[in-house]
Image (cartoon, rainbow, N blue to C red):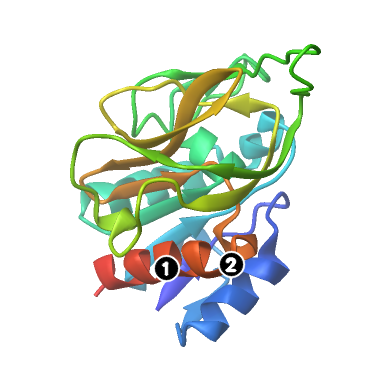
Amino acid sequence: MIALIDYGAGNLTSVRKALTALGAEFTIPRSPADLAAARGLIVPGVGHFGATAALEGDWREAIAAAVEGGTPLLGICLGMQWLFEGSDEAPDVRGLGALRGRITRLQGDAALRLKVPHVGWNALDFRDRPAQILNGLASGAQVYFTHSYAAPITDACVAATTHVDPFASVVERDRVFGVQFHPEKSSDAGLQMLANFLAACG
C-alpha cells in the first residue's frame, strides 16, 4: 500500500488517477502513525514552500523514520523541494533534509522569452549515473513543469533541465526520489517514472 500524503498543498486528484491507472493500491493516511504500514510514501505538492510547514512535527518525524527504515519516498514538485534542507521562498520553514542543498528562485530571460514561473513541457538531460527512477526512459524525454523555484544540481541529481540555467529536475539517493515536474501530467514518460517508483516499493 502506498501512502499519498495530504497536507493541503497536493495535486491529489491527478496523482490518484495516475496511480489508479497503474493498478497501484494507495491510501491517504489520516495520521502519522498510519505511515508505519506503508510500502512507499508520496509527498505531492503545488504552490508556496510555506505550505510544507503543515508537515512539521509528528508528520515530519514519521516520514523521516520511515525513510530511515528503508521505505521509498517520492517527492513531486513542491514535494521534491521539501526533500532538501530549505527554500529561499520560505526561509523560516525547514525541509526534510533528506538531501543536501537549498531551493532557490529560477531566473528569467526576457530576450529568450523565458519567464518565471517556468510552465510547460521541457526536456530531461540525464546525468552520467544509473537511476532506478529513470528506467526505460532516454535522455531528452519531455515532461510537464510548473514552478518558480528549483533545486541545485548536487550528487543526488540524476537528470537536469535548463530554464536559463540548469536545475535538478530528477533526484535519487538510496530510497529517496524526487521529480520537479508533474509525472501525473507528463504522459507516458511520467507514468513510466511512477511505475519505476512503484517497482522500488516492491
Do we see residue 119 in this rendering? Answer: yes
Residue at which label 2 appears: 187
Name the one closer to the observer, 29 or 111: 111
Instruction: Give residue 14's quadrant in the image.
Output: bottom right
Q: Which label was assigned to residue 128? A: none
Q: Residue at x 55, y 59 (%)?
A: 183
170 shown above or below 15: above
Name the one closer to the observer, 173 or 96: 173
> In screen coordinates, is 49 left or right of 63?
right
Question: Residue 197: where, in percent of width, then height?
Answer: 35, 64
56 shown above or below 163: below
Q: Which residue is farthest bottom?
A: 23
Q: Helix, strand, or loop for circle 1?
A: helix
Identify residue type, mark 2.
Ser
Identify residue type, mark 1.
Gln
Q: CA distance from mark 1 to mark 2?
A: 9 Å
Question: Residue 83: where, in percent of width, then height?
Answer: 44, 36
Q: Helix, strand, or loop for circle 2?
A: helix
67 shown above or below 40: above
